[in-house]
Amino acid sequence: MTETKITFEDLGLPEDLLSAVLELGFETPSPIQQACIPHLLSGRDVLGMAQTGSGKTAAFSLPLLAKIDVAQHHPQLLVMAPTRELAIQVADACEQFTKRVKGMRIVTLYGGQRYDIQLRALKQGAQVVVGTPGRILDHIRRGTLDLSNLQSIVLDEADEMLRMGFIEDVETVMAELPEQHQTALFSATMPEPIRRITKRFMKDPQEVKIQSTQRTNPDITQICWFVRGYRKNEALLRFLETEDFDAAILFTRTKTGTLDVTELLEKHGFRAAALNGDMTQQLREQTLDRLRNGSLDILVATDVAARGLDVERISLVVNYDIPLDAESYVHRIGRTGRAGRAGRAILFVEPRERRLLGNIERLMKKPIDEVDVPNHEILQERRREKFKAQVTKQLEHHDLEQYRGLLEDLFTADQDLEDIAAAMLMLLQGKQKLILPPDPPMEPRKSERVRDGRRGERRDNPRSQERRGYGNPIPMDLYRIEVGRADGIDVRHIVGAIANEGDINSRNIGHIKMYDDYSTIELPQGMPNELLQMFGKTRVLNKQMRMTFVGAVNGDEHGQRPGGKRKGRSENGSARGERKFREKKDRTFSEKDDRKPKRARKG
């Protein structure tokens, strides 16, 4: 018995949306689209549990866009997303789906964009509003966003909004909506605060749960390389030269990293471009179009900028910087091996990042095979194969006979043709030498990983001094920011500002302690200076953070020094010493701030 395949034509979408979907190359809806679209078209609330990459953007946008009346120039659909990058991505998808619908206006609202641009778009009568919770709530309070006639609302990646501290803002916005409206909520997990929203604001929601197949996808071959013997950029070039791929995406931890790696690749002849949160939407789209049409082969991106990216050509993912949480790794490698396509993923692991690798393996429920950097023999053989293929192809050129005559004119008959060909090989090889010297001998490898009897599990070094952020063991530094409770600020405002402005996953923001006049925050070690300078100018509720470095946070408690002694804490673990240290630290900051006025009074 043959199973009937469902197509988008079977889901009841209007013709203008259906045409746009088919033009984009989509034929068969994904499981979550098959389940959600009929429910949302019929007006029912939907509670969807699915991972990124399952196709949920189309699952909620297509049916809800189909119900919009373009003759009415007021917001009818509101989509709230945790980050500006995701909001831009959702808005872009909506624009693609409605390109045949005349009179449809879509506005994106997020922090960091000028208010006048957003106000002008709202005044023109946008029917679709996509944005982050904080900026949407800000417009509601200013009276510039009227949701009194809203038909439907979507909460996308609700668990991420919870982690970023936006849930109170979400609940405030939800309370402003008219009584008769449709709600769709999507979340990879369902913690209790999200359940509370579903019970309070949703009416008999239809639950759709799609099991993630990314963790066990047999079509993605995963390998890792421990950083030793070579610098990461040298190893990256060797891997890219010897890997067979159509297009690749490289992940770095920071925006600056995307630019540095892109510059490296371009210098060595790769067609590469960066993708990060600083890019305009127009430039982002141009970059993705180049990747799709084959004029670009490698994309270097941050996690947030590449969220939800699906380009069929991508067959290789390189984790140049290991992600700070295991779920991000799942999302990263999910950029390849999609829709039954085969893919390959390479992970670079610094020695101090072994615990992060262990977290990934536990989540994936299987070990990731370790490999060595391709040696000079492999690299040399691959270069020769490519060179031979280029020459063989050129032998078929119709102008070859003319160049044969030129060769006879240039050289005398007594010169050996093989010598001439060898000399030409030397000239043509360029920077990619066809004869490579042997690699320098490497020191014998110490046991970097000790596996116990259980499948894929590592025993971590007990002396490891890694620090947990929100559920992730990473080394942390402590910073002071000049905003506190007296400014009307709470933790969620700080988390939102850091996550959005710095393109940092909220899971990688550590503990935040708030005082009346200032606060302290833990961020991953190795933050680029450019990013820290930007944070210094970032505003929280219209007040500059003025971020300054305090010191490293090592060990399992705050304030532990690398040597093992805790600042201000006595050997017997008394809390009195720690309290004195905090008082001393506060005094130091206070004296530093008051130093100039005191000198002035002396004068």
Image (cartoon, rainbow, N blue to C red):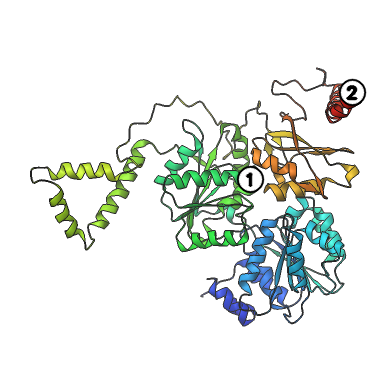
Q: Is residue 500 above or below residue 78?
A: above
Give the image location of residue 199, x and y in percent. Answer: 84, 62
Farthest residue in the left direction? 414
Q: Is residue 422 above or below residue 398?
A: above
Please tell me which residue is depicted at 71% across the width and 49% down the height of the picture. Answer: 501
Residue 350 left/right relative to 561: left
In the rendered structure, which amino acid carries the disc numbered 2? Gly
Q: Name the mark nearer the viewer: 2 or 1.
A: 2
- Give residue 490's position: percent from left, percent from top: 85, 46
Indicate which disc residue 603 carries: 2
User: Quick check: 586 above or below 224?
Assistant: above
Could you tell whether 469 is left or right of 485 in the image?
left
**Residue at the location (62% across, 61% down)?**
281
* Closest to the observer, 491 or 154: 491
**Quick one: label 1, few (<14), some, or many (20+) residues within 10 Å?**
many
Kind of residue at disc 1: Ala
Quadrant for residue 178, please give it: bottom right
Q: Residue at x 44, y 45 (%)?
A: 267
> Where does label 1 land, which residue?
326
